[in-house]
Image: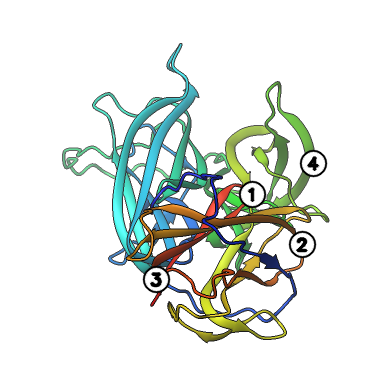
């Protein structure tokens, strides 16, 4: 996508009047290729992926001898040749003096709605224990970051010789076992059997409830006491915000924590204790979400709800107006919109990539359609050629649509 400098130069020899009128409307599921950015529905750290790159065995904690760590990403409505890039970062841990170290980066090309996957193989000396982060970009725009940890090692089975048969020894009752938890997973929901639904360690700001699921093993018959503590990870020491305790037996169990006004953006962690002993620390992030565009359409007019009427990308030179109708969701009360109209090239003007007109406005927080209008020049004709409409929301480019005047 082209980068346009905002040249506040002369707007030729005529006056162009721009107007914006925000109103609510019905949401359309249309997605014009090239006009709307792709969205990311899930970013899941896991031990493997299936043939469609969907996650298998999701996790947010991995052993130091894990052969390969995977990340499965579900992308929706990606235009052709969309680029997904991830950065693998070692944040901090047992490596003294090493912080925020970029381990590796990789890029894949995708389109449409599908899963894609990334993976990182174990280093020669094993994974250093500590906190890691995976950062996902789509077409160089940061979309999500996911925290995960590496802690301890899982046993590697070794072959043993076949024992020589011996007379049976008198049996003794087995000793007491130590309860453990495994498969600890953050998720957006849980099933009736307490298994995770939409596992992730990255949640959108405003999410009301986050879930933590786990598999409990070797619990005594009367059950085992598990305590969950939720911490806010600030620049100084972690701050305990909430805790819960439950008694559970073998099988899956879950905790949930609800904030009535939604989770604010930030870094968090949950610590899980089994009979008073800390067994797992699970980091997760709440990502600030900005305004999103789900539909952008060039048209000759708009209706009373600002939806496009007579959509087209080719306009006659004597058009009275040229409209772009845009559906904006997930707004804040003071979302800033800047809209630029560029004359790219053509036979009637000597300019290329010229800022033809520009404007800005503040949007309300109600989702709905907006229209942006380019009025006919005082000469009575638009210069023939190729144009582009570019919309920035809170300084992020969200729409780029090209159209022609003939």
Residue 21 in percent (x, y) is at 73, 70
Which quadrant holds the N terminus?
A: bottom left
Check disc 1 and report the residue beneath it: 394
The earlier-in-sequence mark between 3 and 1 is 3
Residue 386 seen in render: yes
- Give the mark, 4 or 1, whose residue is nearer the N terminus: 4
User: With 13 as the anchor, is 157 left or right in this view?
Assistant: left
Please name which of the two marks, 2 or 4, marks the residue nearer to the observer.
2
The residue nearer to you, when weighing 28 against 198, is: 28
Q: Are marks 2 and 4 in contact (CB under 8 Å)?
A: no
* Image vertical order of residue 44 relative to residue 189, above or below: above
Mark number, residue 384:
3
**How many angstroms separate mark 4 from mark 1 (CA)?**
33 Å
Circle 1 sits in a helix, a strand or a loop, which is it? Answer: loop
Q: Is residue 3 left or right of residue 369?
A: left
Which residue carries the number 2 mark? Answer: 365
């Amino acid at each position: 996508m082209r980068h346009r400098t905002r040249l506040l130069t002369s707007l030729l020899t005529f006056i162009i009047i721009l107007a914006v009128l925000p109103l609510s409307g019905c949401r359309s599921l249309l997605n014009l290729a090239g006009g709307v950015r792709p969205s990311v529905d899930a970013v899941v750290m896991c031990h493997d992926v299936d043939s469609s790159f969907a996650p298998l065995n999701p996790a947010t904690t991995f052993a130091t001898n894990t052969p390969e760590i995977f990340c499965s990403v579900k992308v929706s409505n990606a235009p052709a040749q969309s680029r997904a890039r991830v950065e693998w970062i070692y944040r901090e841990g047992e490596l003294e003096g090493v912080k925020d170290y970029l381990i590796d980066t990789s890029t894949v090309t995708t389109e449409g709605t599908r899963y894609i996957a990334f993976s990182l193989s174990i280093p020669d000396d094993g994974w250093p224990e500590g906190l890691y982060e995976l950062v996902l970009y789509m077409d160089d725009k940061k979309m999500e970051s996911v925290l995960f940890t590496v802690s301890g090692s899982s046993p590697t089975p070794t072959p043993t010789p076949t024992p020589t048969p011996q007379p049976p020894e008198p049996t003794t009752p087995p000793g007491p076992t130590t309860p453990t938890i495994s498969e600890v997973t953050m998720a957006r929901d849980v099933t009736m059997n307490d298994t995770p639904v939409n596992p992730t360690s990255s949640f959108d700001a405003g999410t009301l409830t986050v879930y933590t699921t786990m598999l409990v093993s070797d619990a005594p018959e009367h059950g085992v006491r598990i305590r969950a503590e939720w911490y806010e990870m600030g620049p100084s020491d972690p701050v305990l915000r909430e805790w819960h305790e439950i008694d559970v037996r073998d099988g899956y169990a879950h905790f949930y924590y609800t904030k009535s006004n939604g989770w604010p953006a930030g870094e968090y962690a949950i610590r899980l204790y089994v009979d008073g002993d800390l067994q797992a620390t699970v980091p997760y992030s709440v990502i600030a979400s900005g305004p999103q565009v789900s539909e952008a359409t060039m048209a000759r007019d708009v209706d009373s709800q600002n939806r496009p009427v007579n959509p087209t990308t080719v306009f006659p030179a004597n058009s009275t107006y040229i409209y772009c109708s845009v559906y904006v969701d997930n707004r804040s009360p003071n979302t800033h919109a800047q809209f630029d109209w560029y004359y790219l090239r053509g036979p009637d003007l000597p300019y290329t990539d010229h800022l033809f007109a520009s404007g800005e406005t503040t949007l309300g927080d109600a989702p709905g359609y907006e229209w942006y209008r380019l009025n006919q020049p005082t000469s009575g004709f638009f210069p023939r050629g190729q144009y582009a409409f570019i919309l920035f929301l809170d300084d992020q480019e969200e729409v780029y649509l090209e159209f022609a005047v003939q």
